[in-house]
Amino acid sequence: MGKWILGSILIVAEILTWIYAPALVFLGLWFVLPFVANHAYQAASDQRKNSKNIILKLFLLLFIAPIGLSITLGLAIRSLIVEARYIPSGGMEPTLQINDRIVIDKVSYVFRTPKRGEIILFEPTQALKRGGFENAFLKRIIGLPGDKVEIKQNVIWINNQPLQEPYTMSGTTESPSPDICRSNYVTMDVESKPIDPPIPIYLSQPQTIPPGHYLVLGDHRELSLDSRCWGLVKRSEIIGQATKRFFPFNRMGRLDKK
């Protein structure tokens, strides 16, 4: 059609969408294809004279079909492969700020076990559900199955060795009181009920993590509602690993970089 500049722009736009916002690729095609179809129709003057229903054919082929395709593939990608999430609270500061947008990888843990230091998305535990929480949580893995974990002198100790944690807000970790654990925990999504009674894993005494369970903490230890108050996360409750931040643009990048 001689529209090579316009075509090049559309191709670059789709490539950038695949890289930075894969969930929007098919939504982009939904809007781009009718635009391209209109140009094709305007260029096909002879065909337009010979075929009265060409507009209907192009509409059905290039507009209606991508809607169904985008919905089907979008749901499949979100449920099985990757999904985008936003951060509603400050429990993972300074690593993750409120309103950050991140990518959750749902595939990696199918082939390997979670590692210490990784940030995971997980379904609410039974204790959290009793507190009124329905949305998934995002915390950092600190204790692995079989680890002996305790808080000593405001430092996390793993198997009798102090854990170096450069990612925390204050560099210290305290054992919260039962009253703090029972307090309401407010985010942009939900104002919870008190967690009563809490599951007291305060780590004032050494705790050995059983098989198939993980101890998770937020990076903002003074603010985070985490394993210290409600217990351990089961392997079956883990949804995936937070791997990348794609918004805001000035802080884009992988989350596992120091």
Image (tube, helix red, strand yellow):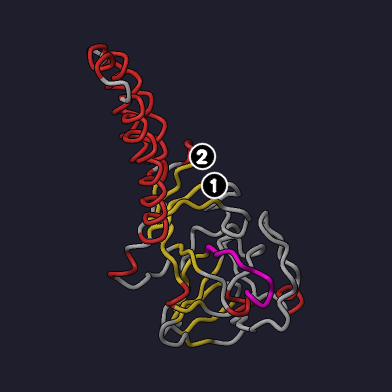
Pick the residue in front: 213 or 48.
48
Q: Tell me where residue 106 sits by quadrant.
A: bottom left
- Residue 20 visible to an observer of this rendering: no
Residue 100 got which mark?
1
Query: Considering only order in the chain, which callout, 2 or 1, is on the residue closer to the N terminus?
Result: 1
Asked if disc 1 and disc 2 are in contact, CB closer than 8 Å, the reply is: yes
In the picture, measured across the screen, residue 8 lies left or right of residue 89, that is left
How far apart in space, not on screen, are marks 1 and 2 (Cα)? Answer: 6 Å
**x and y, in percent, of residue 95 in the image:** 52, 53
Spot occupied by residue 84 in the image (x, y as percentages of width and height) = 46, 51
**Residue ID at (47%, 79%):** 234
Q: Name the element at disc 1.
A: loop
| Vertical arrangement, residue 241 with respect to residue 9, above or below | below
Magenta: main secondary structure: loop
- Which region is colored magenta? 129-138
Residue, x 58% and y 47% (percent of image)? Answer: 99
- Asked whether 131 falls inside the magenta stretch, the response is yes
**Image height of 197 relative to 176, above or below:** below
Residue 248 badge? 2
The answer to which quarter of the image holds residue 146 is bottom left
Q: How many marks?
A: 2
